[in-house]
Amino acid sequence: MLILVLGIVSATLLVIVAIYGLCYLKRFSKHEIKDIESLEEKHEEVKEDLIIFEGGEDLTICDILDAPGEVIGKSNYGTLYKALLQRSSKVRLLRFLRPVCTTTGEELDEMIVFLGRLKHPNLVPLLGFYTGPRGEKLLVHPFYRHGNLTQFIRDGNGESYKWTNIYTISIGIAKGLEHLHTSQEKPIIHGNLKSKNILLDSSYQPHISDSGLHLLLNPTAAQEMLESSSAQGYKAPELIKMKDASEETDIYSLGVILLELLSGKEPINEHPTPDEDFYLPNFMRNAVLGHRISDLYHPAILLRNGVDDEIQVTEECVLKFFQLAMACCSPSPSIRPNIKQVIRKLEEIIH
């Protein structure tokens, strides 16, 4: 009888414990679900975000998403738009980055903050960074009236032949590059310096775009960006065997831009030979080998001397400018001048 009673009591206790346990688990499950839902809601909230930097205080998400845009450039990793913000009536450049090409997480956040604080009169500033609900990313930059340097050189309106403008653009690019190479603890390598990435304002002051853009891309997309420069004639010869861009490869690209400014011609070999060890245009090589200085610059540069030009130019100045550009384009990285030396030489030429 005692055994029976103890058995009944034990069974009753087990049932009570089981019922309590089920109630607890049920209550816990409800809290867990609520917590998960809360986390999901928070996650949804941070998916769409706009980070604003100096100069972009008037930006809003609605302005950016509703702005009518015109495509002015495309690449494997994104698209560049010229957009009119309706509320402020300001024209901005919007760079859309494909989600599959960008880095993610804290690394991306840190790089965005870093680039947003990178300021110099000859660098295109980052005004804002938008992250959309599907992972899309938009960088907001100022728009510059005179477009890019490639357009300026090719349009043939005469301004590109003024020595004043050639010097202003050259020294401005060099100073912007100096800031990238020397202002931080570690040099910021541009990696894709070319005339299309030099934007000109109404005073023909140059502004380097895409500075540090490779820091936002995954390794594959960043390498593709670097490879694209080779087809356009700006890639240093050592990058054929090495993958990493450097200060020296940026200097090479700068030298090509200086030659482009001087000659008015594109830095592309239409029929490159297999034994070419660096990407100088054929017409420049032939001029160097034949010692024909007159073939190295556009004749209008000297013809316009003294005509609506603030700076007088001589053939000696042009020769020194050419020699500096050629030094930057040396096939040996070790003998290229650094950016401070380039600036000093440019200042000596003009004075």
Image (tube, helix red, strand yellow):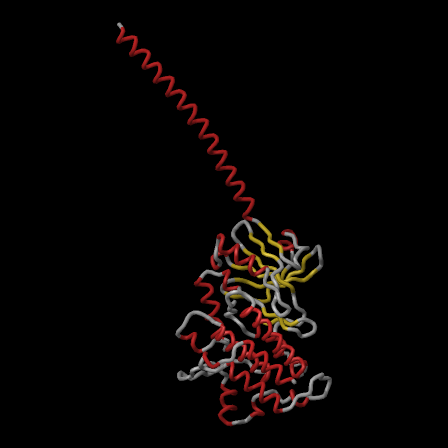
Q: Is residue 335 left or right of residue 116?
A: left
Residue 59 lies, with reference to residue 311, above or below; the image says above
Percent across and percent down for residue 62 are 64, 51
Q: Nearer the viewer, residue 63 or 315?
A: 315
Q: Nearer the viewer, residue 128 or 323?
A: 323
Percent across and percent down for residue 61 are 63, 52
Q: Is residue 29 left or right of residue 50?
A: left
The total of numbered circles placed on residues is: 0
Q: Quadrant of residue 211?
A: bottom right
Q: Quadrant of residue 204?
A: bottom right
Percent across and percent down for residue 189 are 51, 69
User: Residue at the front extreme?
Assistant: 185
Image quarter where the N terminus lies is top left
User: Residue at the top extreme?
Assistant: 1
Image quarter where the C terminus lies is bottom right
Q: Nearer the viewer, residue 3 or 85?
A: 3
Q: Residue at x 53, y 62 (%)?
A: 78
Q: Residue at x 60, y 61 (%)?
A: 126
Residue 250 lies, with reference to residue 303, above or below; the image says above
Percent across and percent down for residue 295 are 56, 90
Q: Residue at x 55, y 47 (%)?
A: 46
